[in-house]
Image (spheres, rainbow, N blue to C red):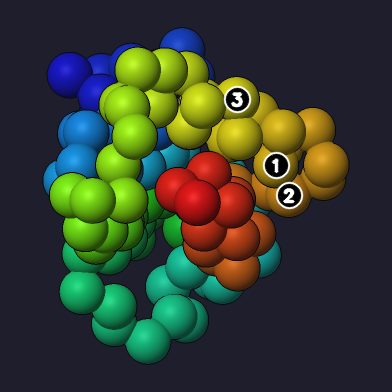
Amino acid sequence: MAVRLLSIFNTLFVKSGSKGVLVVQRVSGVEAVSSWKRLRPVKGTVVVGSSSTPSEAVVLRYYEGLKIGEEEIGTVTGAGDSLAGALLAGMINKLDPAVPQDLDRIIDLAQK
């Protein structure tokens, strides 16, 4: 379903509670696609490009949830809203999810 929605949205963040976040995005531009394809293979990352259209790719990247002890959890009420707010704040502050290092930073900020 997320891949189908890429015709409407460039980037989708799919939250899975304590299991983490899956990022599904359409990347455009030869330079942007090349930067993803040049990455060392990272577990949880898939870059699907087309040989006929080298300036387009779909990137799927999974980020595991942070491991915290049960005694550290006060409440989970609003956790998803906090994650969404932090994702938006990162992008408003000029972090671009289409850039691999920026996406890592956005997710890192959002999960803390």
Residue 60: x and y, percent? 30, 50
Viewer-side label of 1, 2? 1
Q: Which mark is residue 49?
A: none
Task: Mark 2 or mark 3: name the one nearer the start of the chain.
Answer: 3
**Residue 16 sits in quarter:** top left
What crowding class fits label 1: few (fewer than 14 Cα within 10 Å), some (14-19), or many (20 or more)?
many
**Distance from Cα at disc 2 to Cα at disc 3:** 14 Å
Q: Amino acid at mark 1?
A: Gly
Given contact means CB atoms under 8 Å apart, are the residues at marks 1 and 2 in contact?
yes
Is residue 62 rendered to the left or right of residue 93? left
Q: Which residue is mark 1?
A: 90
In-front residue for pair 91/8: 91
What kind of residue is marked 3? Gly
Confirm or deny contact between disc 1 and disc 3 (CB under 8 A). no
Residue at screen point 31% across, 26% down: 76
Residue 45 at least partly seen: yes
Q: Which residue matches tag 3?
A: 85
Q: Is residue 31 above or below residue 26?
A: below
Residue 96, percent from left and from top: 69, 47
Image coordinates for residue 35, horizontal then vertical, percent: 56, 71
Q: Look at discs 1 and 3 and give the one toward the viewer.
A: 3
Which circle's residue, 1 or 2, is located before the other in the chain? 1
Q: Nearer the N terminus, badge 1 or badge 3?
A: 3
Please tell me whether mark 2 or mark 3 is closer to you in this view: 3
Please name the amino acid that badge 2 sits on: Leu
- The residue singled out by tag 2 in the image is 95
* Residue 26 % position (x, y): 45, 38
Residue found at the far right of this picture: 93
Neighbourhood count class around disc 2 (C-alpha, 10 Å): few under 14, some 14–19, many 20 upward: some
